[in-house]
Structures are given as C-alpha cells and as structure tokens.
Amino acid sequence: MAKALITGISGFVGSHMAEFLLKKNIEVVGTIRHRSRMNHIEHLLQDIRLIECELRDPFSVESLIGEEKPDYIFHLAAQSFVPTSWNSPIDTIHNNVAGQVNIFEAVRRFQLDTRIQIACSSEEYGQVEPDEVPIREDNPLRPLSPYAISKMAQDYLGYQYYKSFGLHVVRTRTFNHTGPRRGENFVTSNFAKQIADIEKGKRAPIIYVGNLEAKRDFTDVRDVVRAYWLALQNGEPGECYNIASGSCCTIKEMLELLLSYSNVQIEIKEDPTRLRPSDVEILLGDYSRFHQTTGWTPEIPFEKTMLDLLNYWRSFP
Ligand SMILES: C[C@H]1O[C@H](OP(=O)(O)OP(=O)(O)OC[C@H]2O[C@@H](n3cnc4c(=O)[nH]c(N)nc43)[C@H](O)[C@@H]2O)[C@@H](O)[C@@H](O)C1=O
C-alpha cells in the first residue's frame, strides 16, 4: 500500500486531500501542531494517522521523514491568508519557506525517491497586465504581498532542489479555491457565513465587504485535490502548473450569486478595515499545460461550490 504524508492535514485543503486519498486506498499520515483544531478531520480519525510535527524545526521534520519514508508528500501547510502576511511578514516568510526547506533537506538526507507536491499560488503573478490574461506559467511574477513572496520562494526552491539534487518536486500554482470548510477569513466563506448568520437571526441584515472590484478565478477544492494527486502521477518533476478554472468573476458577482440563494433582504456595506495596502486586480488562469500533461479539467460548477459552502455554514446552530 502506498503511503502519503499530508502536511497541514487538519486545514481546509488537507482535510479534503485526506478524504480523496483514503478513497484511493492510500495510507494517510498527517502532520499537526499542538494547537491545531481537529474539527475538519474528526470524521477521519479512525482511518488516518496524525503526527505532531513543527515543520519549522528541522529535527522534528527529519525524524518524521526518517520514520515514515512516504511515497508521496502533499505539502499543504502554510500561513495562507494574504492580509496576515502584512501584519506578520517575517513570520509568514519564515513559516512557509523554512518548513519546506526542512522537508526537502530531510528527503535528501534519507535519499528517498518521494514525490513531493508543493502548494504554490497564483498570488505569485501579482500585478497582471490586461493583455496577459488568461495567465500562463511563463508570465512574469510581480508579487504584491509578503505572502506572494513566500510562495515565490517555495516555488523556486522546488525548482532548485529538482535541478541541484534531482528531488521529484511538482509545483502547483493554484488559483483561488473554495468549498465546504473554507476558513472564515477568506472572502467566499466570510460572505457565506455572514449570510447564514443573518438567516439565523444572529446578526443584523448587513453584510460587510472589502474590495468588490477584484476579479478571481475560483475552483472547487474537491477538483483541486484531484489535481494534486494527478500532479504526482503524471506531472513532470521540476515543472510548474497552473491549477485554475479558466474563468473569473468579480467579488461583487460572487456576492450576488450567494445572495441569490437567500430569501432575506441584506444591505451591503464597505468595511474599510477589509481593504488591503495593495490588492491583486485580476487572476484568471490558463490551465492548458496541466490539462495536456494530466488530462485534468475542473468538474464542479461554481454555482454548486458556492451553494455547498453556504449550506455548510447553514449547518451550524
Ligand atoms: C490564490 C490565493 O487565493 C487566496 O488569496 P486571496 O485572493 O487574497 O483570497 P481572499 O479570499 O482573502 O480574497 C479574495 C479577494 O476578495 C477581496 N475581498 C473583498 N471583500 C473581502 C472580505 O471581506 N474578506 C476577504 N478576505 N477578501 C475580500 C480581496 O481584497 C481579494 O481581492 C488564498 O487562498 C491564498 O492563500 C492564495 O494562494
């Protein structure tokens, strides 16, 4: 039986990745930290193994990799919220970069032929010119946040460890993704939760928003984890691939879709604290390189993703 290690298994994507791999009969081991919340993976605890590991600590990572010797690593653990990266830039960069270097070094030390997927991001493209969409992998990277810098470093470290040491690293540059369990800081989940709370009478019928003009390309998380699996089956080591839906909408259009699923009358109000020092205007991805290599296409329509997300928040008392 093949064995997969998922870093950040208790997180949004990690929990969906674990579900996907278990259905494929892969043995699943995941890293958690002492303060990790377990609510996303409670239903899986019988079928997975959890190991406490601080990825920033090289000793912790070395003993984990040496003990487990996984066939696959899905490296999903990260500080992934862009606004937090302005408040704690060094922490974001250190967390995201050091954790990954520790994994690479441990795989190298034990001379494993582990296949490693690393979760890079469309945020790396940053400032995109109107004639550059849909964005291809060879577009210049013009990062606009410390988070984007941390992901560029992860991305290029993946390239470098492949070139220097032959590590089997596949770099997935994923555009926005969402679905049930999405953290409530992120815009889709934040708006869905506000609507669900208004429906329950827990708050006044006013939804607070930030920049509604930004355009984003959303993929369902369940399509994304399938892409990560295919990246390690058929992806070229050292290569980077866009994972995207190939279409985008404004945040306003996304909000209107969510509101169309609700019967309550809701007022929209801008909350200035939700505006960012600089916001990426448009992210629209061309995923043809990944499609040609793996045959992947996104399958779940955006309308279903957003309804599932709203119903997820409605399911809480
Ligand atoms: C690919 C990339 O995708 C994600 O990064 P993100 O695009 O920053 O995601 P988000 O959901 O925080 O914002 C999306 C857009 O929505 C705007 N927006 C408006 N109003 C609110 C609002 O009220 N809250 C938030 N959070 N955003 C708002 C906000 O200004 C931005 O333009 C992460 O997964 C990241 O890890 C990643 O890699």
Image: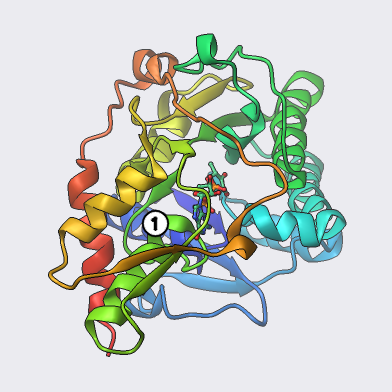
The residue sitting at 50% across, 65% down in the picture is 11
Kindly indicate the quadrant of the structure image that contains residue 194. bottom left
Q: Residue furthest left?
A: 263
Query: Does the image show residue 115?
Result: no
Q: Compared with residue 76, is residue 176 higher up or lower down, i.e. above or below? A: above
How many badges with numbers are in the image? 1
The type of colouring in the image is rainbow
Q: Quadrant of the C terminus?
A: bottom left
| Location of residue 239 in the rendering, given as x and y in whole percent from the top left corner | 59, 19
Nearest to the observer: residue 232 or residue 152: 152
Please tell me which residue is depicted at 47% across the width and 33% down the height of the picture.
232
Residue 271 makes an appearance in the image: yes
Tell me where residue 29 appears, x and y as whole percent: 51, 63
Picture layout, residue 1 above or below residue 238: below
Furthest toward the top, the residue is 131
Q: Is residue 143 above or below residue 145?
A: above
Question: At 21% across and 36% down in the image, what residue appears?
Answer: 299
Q: Is the residue marked 1 within 8 Å of ligand 1, measured from its CB?
A: yes
Given residues 90 and 87, the one toward you in this image is 87
Crowding near pointer 1: few (<14 within 10 Å), some, many (20+)?
Answer: many
User: Residue 69: x, y in percent?
Assistant: 62, 52
Q: Quadrant of residue 35?
A: bottom right
Q: Secondary structure at mark 1?
A: helix
Residue at 51% across, 24% down: 241
The x and y percentages for residue 221 are 36, 49
Q: Is 242 on the left or on the right of 51, as rendered?
A: left
Q: Is residue 67 left or right of residue 304?
A: right
Task: Find disc 1 in the rendering and name its residue.
Answer: 188
Amino acid of disc 1: Thr
Residue 211 vertical position relative to residue 11 in the rendered view, above or below:
above
